[in-house]
Amino acid sequence: MTRTIGAGIVVTLALTCASACSGHARPQLPVQPANRTQTLGATIESQDGDLASALLQLALVRTAEHHRAVADEYRRLKILDAAFDHLSAATRIDPRDAAAYDARARIWRDWGVPELGLADSARAVYYAPRSAAAHNTRGTLLAAAGMRNEAAREFEAALRIDPGATFARTNLCLLVGC
């Protein structure tokens, strides 16, 4: 069914009956105009120059790198849901984007649900096996999820890749005691 709702907007609805048979009449649903929201006052996107710049770059060229840059700015501003959305967009553009998976895993950790970030951290390590940061992030998620031995192995892997990775050394010491 096709309907036109305000301002020439055309909506097409395709409905199927619950029993998936053609003998049932399809219900007619009322189509309501889309809810419109109006922003009053300044937004963070218009007030923060670094975020505005990153958003402009993204508007000009939609790349995984530009989505990550916008996500970095939202993370800096502690707007994690928007950051997560841009990181997800980056992984849709480039399904091998280890940096985006690593950053999403960190957000899951920051939200207090490290178990939900384990898949993203595994992808980050898979696509960037020589990244000390990805191994370290995975270690922090494993530690937060109570998997201490696995966490220690990830911190040690990070240190094998980069012996100067003080973040991994600090995390390993906090985990096992130094």
Image (cartoon, grey):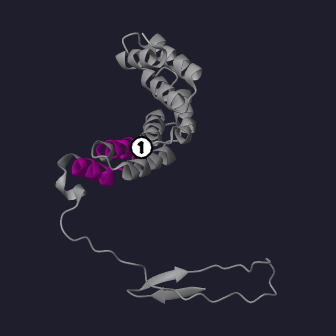
Horizontally, residue 113 falls left or right of residue 65, namely right
The answer to if 59 sits in the magenta stretch is yes
Above or below, 97 relative to 167: below
Rendering coords of residue 88 (x, y %): 47, 48
The answer to if 28 sits in the magenta stretch is no
Q: Which residue is mark 1?
A: 64
Rendering coords of residue 58 (x, y %): 32, 50
Question: Regarding mark 1 in the picture, which secondary structure is present there?
Answer: helix
Query: Callout 1: 10 Å neighbours few (<14), some, many (20+)?
Result: many
Q: Main secondary structure of the magenta part?
A: helix
Which residue is painted at 71% across and 78% down in the image? Answer: 16
In terms of image quadrants, where is residue 178? top left
Above or below, 81 relative to 37: above
Which residue is painted at 54% across and 29% down in the image? Answer: 142
Horizontally, residue 84 falls left or right of residue 61, namely right
Which residue is painted at 42% across and 25% down in the image? Answer: 133
Q: Say which of 125 and 127 sits in front.
A: 125
Which residue is painted at 36% across and 11% down in the image? Answer: 164
Q: The residue under label 1 is which amino acid type? A: Ala
Above or below, 4 relative to 86: below
Horizontally, residue 139 falls left or right of residue 16, namely left
The segment highlighted magenta reads 51-73
Q: Say which of 13 and 166 sits in front.
A: 166
In terms of image quadrants, where is residue 110? top left
Rendering coords of residue 144 (x, y %): 50, 31
